[in-house]
Image: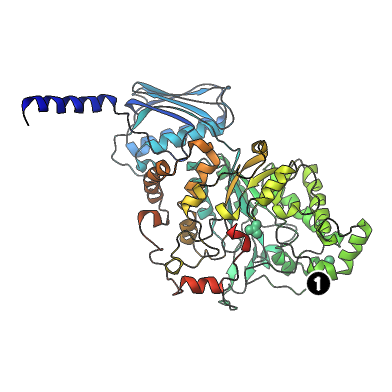
C-alpha cells in the first residue's frame, strides 16, 4: 500500500472511531428511553448520597446495594464521585431517571419500585459478579447513559403453581429474586388444588394434615401413579416471611384460592363440603375433576369466608384471586341442595348458559362481596365471565385471548395470560422427544416475546389491560431444576411484553441482550433451557424415549384452543 492509500485508510479508521456510537448496555426489559454517551462512571468506591424524603424501604434497598458493591468489589464507598438518589415527584409510578456522567450519577424516582428498578438497571450494567456475594475482580464501571424508564403495564405477573408439585420456600425466594431483576411486580401464587392444599389455615387444620398430601403422583400420562406419598405446605409464618421478602423486591403476592372447582384436597379434608359427601381422596392424577364444592350448603360459604379471612390476614394484596376456572357442573345438577339453591334464586337457563353456570355466578358474586367488604378486590379466570359478572371484578384471560377481549368489551379490567403465548409450562423446543416430558405443545421464547396484548382488543382497550402474566403450572415439574428450566429464558421474554411499549420491542436486540442475562442466570445458579444457544434438552434429566408422533397421540391434555 503506498502512502496516499495508507493516509486514506487511517482517515477512515479515525472517522469510524469518532462517529461510532458507544455500545448500548444489555438491559432486560429494555428501558423506555436510553441514550448512551462516551465515557464511564466508576461505581466501586463511589459515594452513595441519599436525599431526605426518599421512602424508607428505598433507603434500605440503596443501602443493601451499596453493601453488595463494597463486598463484591472490595472497595469501600465514599471516596469516589457520588451517585445521588433524589426524590422526583414528577416521575410516575415505578418509573425512574438515571443519568450517568464520568464524574457522577443521579437516580430519580417517586416511589420505592422506581428506585429499586433503577438499581436493577445499574446492576445489569455491572459485571455479573454483582449478583453474587463473593469478592470478584472487575472494573466496576457503568457506561455514561441517560435513561428515562417506566413500565407499559402496571401488573407484571408470574403464576407459580406450588400445588401439583411443592417448591420449598428457598426456591420460591429464588424465583422472587429473578422477578425483581426483571422488574416483575406480582407473584400469583397458586396455593390450593385438587392435588394438594398448601396454605396452613388455623381454623381448618385438616386442610394441611390431610389435604396437603397425596398417596401417589401420576406417572407420565399413564393411568398409573408412583404410589409414593407426596406433599407439603407452608405455615402461616413461612407465608408471612415470603410476603415480606417479596415486598422488599417491589413484588406483591396475590394468593389464589381456586373455587368452587379444583377443591378436592379440601373435600378430602372436610367431605361434608361436597355434594355427595365423599369419601374423597387428594387427587393423584392431573386434569379437571367433577367433584367440586357443594354451593347449596351454607357451611360451604362459612368455610370459604373463614379461609379467606385468614388468607387476607396473611396476604395484604389489594387483589385476591378466587380462581373460578374449570368447574364442572355435573354434581350440582344431581344435588338436591344445589338445585334447591337454584330454585330459591330463580335461576334459569339463559343466553346459552345453564342455570348451573348462573349458580357459579352467584358464588362469585357472594365471595366478591365478602372480599370487597374487607377492602379487597377479586381477580378470577375468564370462566367467571360466563353468564353474569358483577362490576369491579378483574378477569384473567387464559383460554386464548378471547375471554380478555370480551371482558374489555364489557368494561372489565383484564390481566392477559393467554395459554397461546403465556403458558410457559409448554414445551419450548419442537424436539419434544429430546425434552423432559411436559404438558401442552410448542411455545418458544420468540412466540412469547411476540405477544402483543392489544391484538384483537377494541381501540380504546389498553386502559383496561391491567397487565400480562406468564403462567408456570407444575404438573410435570418435579424438581426446582425442572421449574427453572421451564421459566428461563421465556420469563425474560415475557418481561419485555409487560414492560416495553410495542415499538420498543425488537427480537434481535433482545436476543443479543439475552447472552448477558444468561450469564446472570448462571451466576445465580439457575438451570435454563439452552435451545437458543443450540443445545436441546436438559442435561442429567432422564428422558423417556417417546417420538413426537407418539406424544401427540397420547396427549390427553391437548387443549383445542391452543391452536388458536
Ligand atoms: C387454567 O389454566 N386452568 C387457568
Ligand atoms: Zn351440592
Q: Secondary structure at mark 1?
A: loop
Q: Where 548 falls versus 460 (above or below)?
A: below
Q: Quadrant of residue 561?
A: bottom right
Q: Is residue 347 left or right of residue 72?
A: right
> What residue would you read off at disc 1?
277
Q: Quadrant of residue 82?
A: top left
Query: Is 52 or 537 nearer to us in this picture?
Result: 537
Look at the image and tell me whether residue 411 can be seen: yes
Residue 179: x and y, percent?
51, 45
Q: Is residue 264 left or right of residue 4?
A: right
Query: Is 178 or 352 nearer to us in this picture?
Result: 352
Which residue is rendered at x = 83% and y = 55% of the image?
Answer: 351
Query: Is 64 or 35 nearer to us in this picture?
Result: 35
Q: Where 462 falls versus 519 (above or below)?
A: above
Q: Determine whether the beta carbon of the residue marked 1 sits less than 8 angstroms from the nearest atom of ligand 2.
A: no
Residue 207: x and y, percent?
70, 63
Look at the image and tell me whether residue 220 can be seen: no
The type of colouring in the image is rainbow
Q: Quadrant of residue 151?
A: top right
Regarding ligand 2, which quadrant of the image does it lie in?
bottom right
**Figure label count:** 1
Q: Residue furthest left?
A: 2
State the quadrant of the C terminus: bottom right
Which residue is rendered at x = 55% and y = 25% of the image?
Answer: 54
Residue 403: x and y, percent?
69, 51
Label 1 neighbour load within 10 Å: few <14, some 14-19, many 20+ = few
Q: Is residue 205 left or right of residue 34?
A: right
Which residue is rendered at x = 45% and y = 41% of the image?
Answer: 506
State the quadrant of the N terminus: top left
Residue 339: x and y, percent?
89, 65
Amino acid at each position: 500500500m503506498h502512502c496516499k492509500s495508507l493516509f486514506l485508510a487511517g482517515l477512515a479508521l479515525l472517522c469510524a472511531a469518532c462517529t461510532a456510537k458507544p455500545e448500548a448496555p444489555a438491559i432486560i426489559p429494555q428501558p423506555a428511553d436510553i441514550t448512551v454517551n462516551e465515557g464511564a462512571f466508576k461505581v466501586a468506591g463511589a459515594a452513595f448520597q441519599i436525599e431526605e424524603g426518599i421512602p424508607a424501604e428505598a433507603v434500605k434497598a440503596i443501602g443493601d446495594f451499596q453493601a453488595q458493591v463494597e463486598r463484591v468489589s472490595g472497595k469501600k464507598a465514599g471516596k469516589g464521585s457520588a451517585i445521588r438518589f433524589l426524590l422526583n415527584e414528577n416521575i410516575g409510578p415505578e418509573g425512574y431517571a438515571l443519568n450517568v456522567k464520568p464524574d457522577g450519577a443521579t437516580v430519580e424516582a417517586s416511589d420505592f419500585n422506581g428506585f429499586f428498578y433503577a438499581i436493577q438497571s445499574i446492576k445489569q450494567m455491572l459485571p455479573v459478579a454483582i449478583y453474587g456475594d463473593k469478592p470478584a475482580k472487575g472494573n466496576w464501571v457503568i457506561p455514561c447513559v441517560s435513561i428515562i424508564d417506566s413500565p407499559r403495564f402496571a401488573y407484571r405477573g408470574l403464576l407459580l403453581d406450588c400445588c401439583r408439585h411443592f417448591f420449598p420456600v428457598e426456591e420460591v425466594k429464588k424465583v422472587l429474586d429473578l422477578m425483581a431483576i426483571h422488574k416483575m411486580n406480582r407473584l400469583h401464587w397458586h396455593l390450593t388444588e385438587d392435588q394438594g392444599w398448601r396454605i396452613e389455615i388455623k381454623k381448618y387444620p385438616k386442610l394441611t394434615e390431610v389435604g396437603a398430601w397425596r398417596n401417589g403422583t401420576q406417572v407420565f400420562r399413564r393411568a398409573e401413579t408412583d404410589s409414593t406419598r407426596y406433599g407439603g405446605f407452608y405455615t402461616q409464618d413461612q407465608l408471612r416471611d415470603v410476603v415480606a421478602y417479596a415486598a422488599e423486591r417491589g413484588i406483591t403476592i396475590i394468593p389464589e384460592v381456586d373455587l368452587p372447582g379444583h377443591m378436592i384436597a379440601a373435600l378430602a379434608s372436610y367431605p361434608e363440603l361436597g355434594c355427595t359427601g365423599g369419601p374423597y381422596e387428594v387427587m393423584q392424577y392431573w386434569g379437571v375433576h367433577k367433584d367440586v364444592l357443594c354451593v347449596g350448603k351454607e357451611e360451604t360459604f362459612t368455610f370459604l369466608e373463614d379461609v379467606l379471612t385468614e388468607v387476607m390476614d396473611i396476604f395484604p394484596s389489594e387483589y385476591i384471586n378466587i380462581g373460578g376456572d374449570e368447574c364442572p357442573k355435573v354434581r350440582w345438577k344431581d344435588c338436591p341442595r344445589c338445585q334447591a339453591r337454584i330454585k330459591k334464586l330463580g335461576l334459569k337457563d339463559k343466553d346459552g348458559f345453564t342455570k348451573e353456570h348462573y349458580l357459579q355466578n352467584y358464588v362469585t358474586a357472594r365471595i366478591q362481596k365478602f372480599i370487597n367488604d374487607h377492602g379487597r378486590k377479586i381477580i378470577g379466570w375468564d370462566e367467571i365471565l360466563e353468564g353474569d359478572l358483577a362490576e369491579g371484578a378483574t378477569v384473567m384471560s387464559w383460554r386464548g385471548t378471547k375471554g380478555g377481549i370480551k371482558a374489555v368489551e364489557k368494561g372489565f379490567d383484564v390481566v392477559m395470560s393467554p395459554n397461546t403465548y403465556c403458558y410457559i409450562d409448554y414445551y419450548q423446543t419442537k424436539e419434544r422427544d429430546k425434552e423432559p416430558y411436559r404438558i401442552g405443545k410448542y411455545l418458544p421464547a420468540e412466540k412469547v416475546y411476540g405477544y402483543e396484548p392489544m391484538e384483537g382488543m377494541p381501540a380504546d382497550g389498553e386502559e383496561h389491560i391491567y397487565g400480562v402474566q406468564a403462567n408456570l403450572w407444575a404438573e410435570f415439574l418435579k424438581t426446582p431444576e425442572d421449574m427453572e428450566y421451564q421459566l428461563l429464558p421465556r420469563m425474560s421474554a415475557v418481561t419485555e411484553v409487560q414492560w416495553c411499549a410495542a415499538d420498543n420491542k425488537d427480537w434481535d436486540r433482545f436476543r443479543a441482550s439475552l447472552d448477558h442475562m444468561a450469564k446472570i442466570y448462571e451466576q445465580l445458579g439457575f438451570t435454563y433451557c439452552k435451545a437458543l444457544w443450540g443445545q436441546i434438552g436438559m442435561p442429567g434429566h432422564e428422558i423417556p424415549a417417546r417420538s413426537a408422533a407418539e406424544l401427540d397421540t397420547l396427549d390427553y391434555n391437548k387443549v383445542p384452543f391452543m391452536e388458536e
